Amino acid sequence: MKIAFIGAGKVGTNLARYFAEGGLDISGFFVRKNQSTDDLRDLLAASDIVFITVNDDSVGPVVKRISGLGLPLAGKSFGHTCGSLSVAVLKPLEDLGASVFACHPLQTFSSRAVEDELLKEMHFFVENPQDPHLKRIFDRIPNPLHEIKSEDKIKYHLGASIMANLTMGLMDFAFDLIEEIGVDKESGFQAFKPLLKGTCTHLLEEGPEKALTGPLKRRDRDTIEKHLAVLKSEDRELYRLLALKTLNLVEPGPDTIKIKKLLKEGANNG
């Protein structure tokens, strides 16, 4: 079984290397900027399963280009690796006889050389895991596979984006506050790194409810009120909404009711 990749970015190159290390046969890559239509035709003809590892907006055009080649696709499998797109975008290839799937590796690909240990630990969320060629791949690698419905893809991707992407904005918000007291961001990052490590360790080991500490956990209304007082406009609203969401992790009681009232009133007092 030969595996091809359309797109040689971070996802494609990492998956190809990982599959090859698992003893799977990589037939090659197609990169639009550097190769011709004949190169694409030759690669597809020589491959059994093709991973489309381009960005979300490019998947449709890639499918259209493949469909226009006039190649027989029966017996071949095509899949994309986008977390937010369903398998439906590959329907034109299915209409030409191919088996299609969507296979999203749940990992952050910050470089073309993600550590092997992270690749081995990542889970895959898949539409149509029954694809025969895809099953053969997962027979050779240790990664867990989860079947996902098309209608659940956006919420799935949103959850992953909040965890892996929007947390960076949250961290930048925190370091902005530290910078305001005269500590530059680099020094602040070094100072707060142990706190971040400890927080992440507890989160991964125990989950958010047990890992939560701080004034919300302690039901410290006075401190929360002081936090709100030093924030303005959008920053205050961000804190207020995050605190309300986080308060759901705290056991309810009279104190949490008072804190919730304070946070909700904050919408009108910012």
Image (spheres, rainbow, N blue to C red):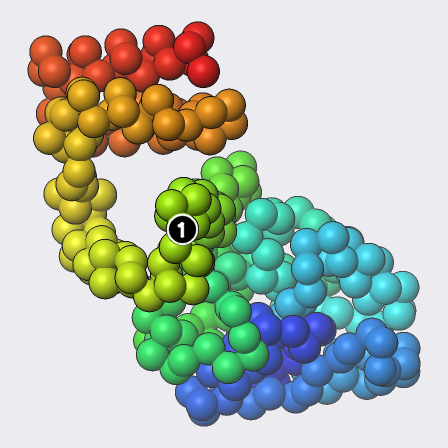
In this view, the residue in front, 71 or 224, is 224
Q: Whole-percent x and y of residue 37?
A: 90, 77
The image position of residue 144, as x and y in percent, is 34, 65
The location of residue 15, given as percent across then percent down, is: 53, 77
In the figure, residue 6 lies in which quadrant? bottom right
**Amino acid type of the residue tagged 1 in the rendering:** Gly
The residue positioned 27% from the left and 24% from the top of the image is 226
Q: Residue at x 43, y 64 (%)?
A: 186
Residue wearing tag 1: 182
Relative placement, left or right, of 105 versus 102 is left
In the rendered image, the residue lying farthest to the front is: 182
Residue beneath the point at 85% across and 82% down: 35
> Which image quarter holds the C terminus?
top left
Q: Quadrant of the N terminus?
A: bottom right
Q: What secondary structure is marked by label 1? A: loop
**Between residues 248 and 260, which one lies in front from this camera angle?**
260
